[in-house]
Each structure stands twice: as structure tokens, then as C-alpha cells.
């Protein structure tokens, strides 16, 4: 009978699924307090905003929100890039932020062949970056990056891609190629009559002055040096002619004086140039001023002459011929310099001209005093 009663009692009990498992009120309050304590501890352990760990500000948003940690080393940064990408810096960003970008330097137009902005991570032996922005090369209008090398497709007017299409070079017209090869020798051959100022310019620079060995750097430097020497000799010849009363009767207002002054001033600007743009403008101004004076002297006495002068004596005629010879020398040298292949890029690498402080000071002083004397 007792067994039957126990069995009946079990059958009358509700199933486990139908019973709602509710904790006792006292245990429920204890669980809530424990969860709150854990969240407070976690909040205290979280990294606080700092210079390296920015707060949630959209201006300083971390560029890789899917990365759960701050990347502090180059090795970790490389892991985030593809196998054919390099870790480069972000232009305009402070290196201390350790921001970087993954760049395919084999095809990127602004970082061809390497990073133009170095990565911000520490390296014990950091190599010099050789990256190139292809469309910022001198004279380039359009280009692409192929196999880590700039390929130029279009250049500005007067320029054309060179044989391997890596840069823009001047377009040579028929007969001008020989000027480049013979300009320096022709100018230096006439240096036998150089003045003391010109000899200073042709002297060896003092010890310690950086020298550029090999073409085209050394050649351009020698061409500029010889060109300035020729202008100094031209100055001396024109000063003598004016002292003899030839060529000018109106002093500093005469076309002759203005043209000579323009040649001298263009030479001053060229030798004192600190950037390629100024140097190129000075070379063009020198070519134009020299051609104008040569034309005016050749036409003297004709109806189209811009310089009025009385009939010359035999001695004065010799002086004019000497000036024309010097003008021809300056013209050949300046035209050859202007048409030198890769002139702009070479000037960028060697400016300012390293003639030595003393030599440069003497040259500029002599030329500037000459310019002043022409105005008096």
C-alpha cells in the first residue's frame, strides 16, 4: 500500500520542462552586483586616450578599425600588407602617430619604385627611399608606373620622351646637336684672352668644396663657368668701346647700354641661381639678350638699325668685330647650355653652383659693378 501511494505521488508531480527555474530573490541580487563589479574593473583596465591612442574623434580615426591592437613595429605592419606591397608613410601625417599605408610600388604613380614618404617605424639601418612621383618629373604631362619604373608617354611643348622613356628631354632641331658637343671647347679656346676676373672663375675651387664628377653634372658646371668667363670678357670689350666714344652717344639710355646690361644681369641671375626654375629663366634671358645685341651691331648703319652711331674708324671697326666675336662665343655657349639634355633635372641636383665662396663673391661683385657702371 505504501508503494502504491509513493508511485501515485510521483505521477502527480509536474514535468521538469514545465517548471520555471527562478532563483531565490537573495541569490538574484548577488548575481547582479557581481556583474556590475566586473564591468567596472574592465573599464578601469581599458587603454585611456593618449597621443598614440586617440579618442573616438573622426579627425583622428584609426584607419584600420578591424585591427584590435595598435601596430607599433614594422614587422607587424608588413603582416597587414599584401606580399607585393610595401609599408609606406602617409604624406602630411605626423610620424609619431605611426600611421602607414600599403603601397604597390611597382605600379603606384606617386610612389614608383619605392615609398616617396618613408614609413614611421623604427629601423636600425634605414635605407634611402628611391620612390618617384612619375607625373611630377620635370616636363612630364602624362606617365605611368610599370615594373617599379616611370614610363613617360607625353611631355610639355619643346620636350619629348628620351629613348628609354624615363624622362623628358629637349627636342633637338637639325644642326643643334653639334653645339652641345663643341660648346665648352670653343669657349675655353677663347679663354686665352681672359681677364683676371675670368681666370678666377676658371681656377680650381678651394679644398672642401663639393665637386660633381662625370657628365652631365661636371659638364654643366664647366659650361656655366666658361659662359660667365666669356661674358666678363665681353663686358671689358664693350667698356673699352664706350670709353672710345663708339657705339653709344646717349649713355645709359642707349639701346647698346641696355642690351649689354641685360646680358650681364642675366649672367648674374644664372650664377646666383638657387633653383632650376630661376636658372632656366636666366639662360633664356641670356640667349635672347645676346641675340638682340648681335643683331643690332650687325645692322648698325643700315636703315633698320636700332643703334645710331657716326661712321666708325678702322680701330672702332676692329672693336666692334671683337665684340661680335665675343657675342658669338656667348651665344653658342648659352644656346648649347639651354639645349643640354636633361638640363632641368641635372640643375636640380647640383644647384646652387659650387664654385667656392670666394670665387662666387668675386664673380658677382665684378658683374654687379659692371652693371652699375653701365648705368652711369
Image (cartoon, helix red, strand yellow):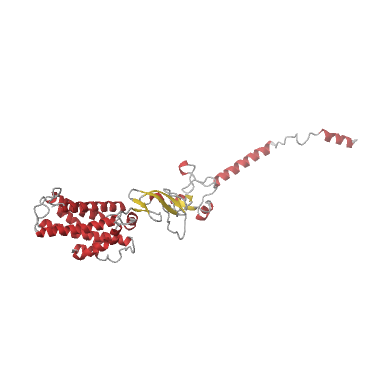
> In the current view of this chain or complex, which residue is farthest to the front?
174
Can I make out residue 373 in this image? yes
Image location of residue 170, percent across then percent down = 33, 53
- Count of numbered badges drawn on the protein: 0
Image location of residue 333, percent across then percent down = 25, 58
Image location of residue 120, percent across then percent down = 45, 53
Image location of residue 350, percent across then percent down = 32, 58
Could you tell whether 80 is left or right of 314 in the image? right
Could you tell whether 101 is left or right of 234 in the image? right
- Report the front residue among 248 and 37: 248
Could you tell whether 101 is left or right of 223 in the image? right
> In the current view of this chain or complex, which residue is farthest to the right?
1
Can I make out residue 133 in this image? no
Query: To which quarter of the image does residue 369 belong?
Result: bottom left
Locate the N terminus and report the quarter of the image it occupies. top right
Amino acid at each position: 500500500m505504501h508503494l502504491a501511494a509513493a508511485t501515485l505521488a510521483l505521477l502527480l508531480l509536474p514535468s521538469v520542462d514545465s517548471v520555471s527555474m527562478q532563483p531565490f530573490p537573495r541569490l538574484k541580487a548577488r548575481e547582479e552586483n557581481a556583474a556590475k563589479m566586473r564591468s567596472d574593473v574592465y573599464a578601469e583596465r581599458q587603454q585611456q586616450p593618449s597621443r598614440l591612442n586617440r579618442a573616438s574623434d573622426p579627425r583622428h580615426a584609426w584607419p584600420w578599425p578591424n585591427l584590435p591592437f595598435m601596430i607599433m613595429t614594422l614587422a607587424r605592419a608588413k603582416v597587414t600588407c599584401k606580399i607585393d606591397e610595401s609599408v609606406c608613410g602617409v604624406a602630411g601625417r605626423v610620424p609619431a602617430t605611426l600611421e602607414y599605408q600599403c603601397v604597390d610600388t611597382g605600379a603606384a604613380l606617386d610612389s614608383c619604385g619605392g615609398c616617396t614618404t618613408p614609413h614611421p617605424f623604427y629601423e636600425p639601418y634605414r635605407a634611402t627611399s628611391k620612390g618617384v612621383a612619375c607625373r611630377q618629373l620635370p616636363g612630364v604631362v602624362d606617365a605611368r608606373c610599370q615594373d617599379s619604373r616611370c614610363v613617360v608617354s607625353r611631355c610639355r611643348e619643346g620636350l619629348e620622351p628620351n629613348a628609354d622613356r624615363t624622362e623628358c628631354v629637349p627636342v633637338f632641331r637639325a644642326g643643334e646637336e653639334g653645339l652641345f658637343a663643341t660648346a665648352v671647347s670653343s669657349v675655353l679656346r677663347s679663354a686665352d684672352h681672359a681677364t683676371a676676373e675670368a681666370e678666377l672663375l676658371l681656377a680650381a675651387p678651394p679644398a672642401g668644396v663639393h665637386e660633381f664628377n662625370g657628365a652631365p653634372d661636371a659638364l654643366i658646371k664647366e659650361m656655366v663657368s666658361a659662359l660667365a668667363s666669356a661674358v666678363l670678357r665681353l663686358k671689358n670689350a664693350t667698356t673699352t668701346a664706350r670709353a672710345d666714344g663708339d657705339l653709344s652717344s646717349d649713355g645709359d639710355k642707349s639701346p647698346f647700354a641696355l642690351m649689354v646690361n641685360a646680358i650681364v644681369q642675366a649672367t648674374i641671375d644664372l650664377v646666383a641661381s638657387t633653383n632650376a626654375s630661376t636658372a632656366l629663366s636666366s639662360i633664356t634671358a641670356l640667349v635672347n639678350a645676346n641675340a638682340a645685341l648681335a643683331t643690332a651691331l650687325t645692322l648698325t648703319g643700315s636703315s633698320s638699325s636700332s643703334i645710331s652711331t657716326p661712321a666708325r674708324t678702322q680701330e672702332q671697326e676692329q672693336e666692334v668685330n671683337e665684340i661680335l666675336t665675343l657675342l658669338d662665343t656667348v651665344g653658342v655657349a648659352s644656346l648649347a647650355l639651354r639645349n643640354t639634355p636633361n638640363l632641368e633635372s641635372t640643375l636640380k641636383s647640383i644647384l646652387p653652383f659650387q664654385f667656392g665662396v670666394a670665387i662666387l663673391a668675386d664673380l658677382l661683385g665684378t658683374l654687379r659693378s659692371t652693371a652699375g657702371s653701365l648705368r652711369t
